[in-house]
Amino acid sequence: MFAVFVTINIKDGFADEFQKASFGDSQGSVKDEPGCFRFDILKNAEVPNQFHLYEVYEDEQAFQYHQTTPHYKKWRQTVQPWFEGETQRVLLDTIFPSDQGWRDQKPCLLNW
């Protein structure tokens, strides 16, 4: 599986709005994209305006597809003005769970 870990710093006063706006992208990804197996939104406990996204996809093509979806485009257009500096992105290959383990967990992601 292909994973990405993104770090985003948000301008002062926009953390709550960023968090709310990010739900649509996260939920749309796991619900509407067959190749998305995880999309976590994390808030740094020590840096209040810093968020991390952890996403797992079938492969890099599934991730590239994600960036063309309506929920992603809406999210990006909404939150980009709140970014403080450049985002940082780390590309990863998953080790555990196994690829089949990720696939088997997919139905559980839809129970919010």
Image (cartoon, helix red, strand yellow):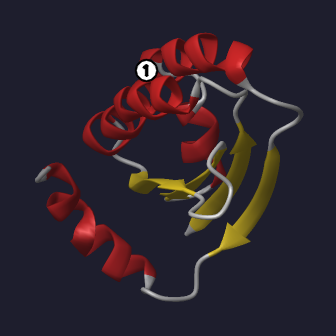
Image position of 85 (left or right of 36): right
Q: Nearer the viewer, residue 44 or 28?
A: 44
Residue at image location 44% in from the left, 55% down from the top: 40
* x 70%, y 33%: residue: 10
Q: Is residue 32 left or right of residue 20?
A: left
* Residue placed most toward the observer, 80 or 17: 17
What residue sits 25% from the left and 39% below the top? 31
Indicate the position of residue 84 as horizontal and vertical percent values. Answer: 81, 30
Residue 83 placement: quadrant? top right
- Determine whether the residue tagged by mark 1 lies in a helix, strand or loop: helix
What's under tag 1, amino acid-wise?
His
Query: Where in the figure is residue 93, as x and y percent of width and height?
Result: 67, 74
Question: Looking at the image, which residue is at 78% across and 60% down?
Answer: 90
Q: Looking at the picture, does residue 100 appear above or below residue 82?
A: below
- Count the marks: 1
Closer to us: 21 or 89: 21
Q: Is residue 61 above or below residue 16?
A: below
The image quarter in which residue 102 lies? bottom left
94 displayed left or right of 83? left
> Residue 17: image x %, image y %?
48, 23
Is 42 or 55 nearer to us in this picture? 42
- Packing grade of label 1 (10 A; few <14, some 14-19, many >=20) is some
Q: Position of residue 1 (x, y in %)?
A: 55, 69
**Residue topped by disc 1:** 71
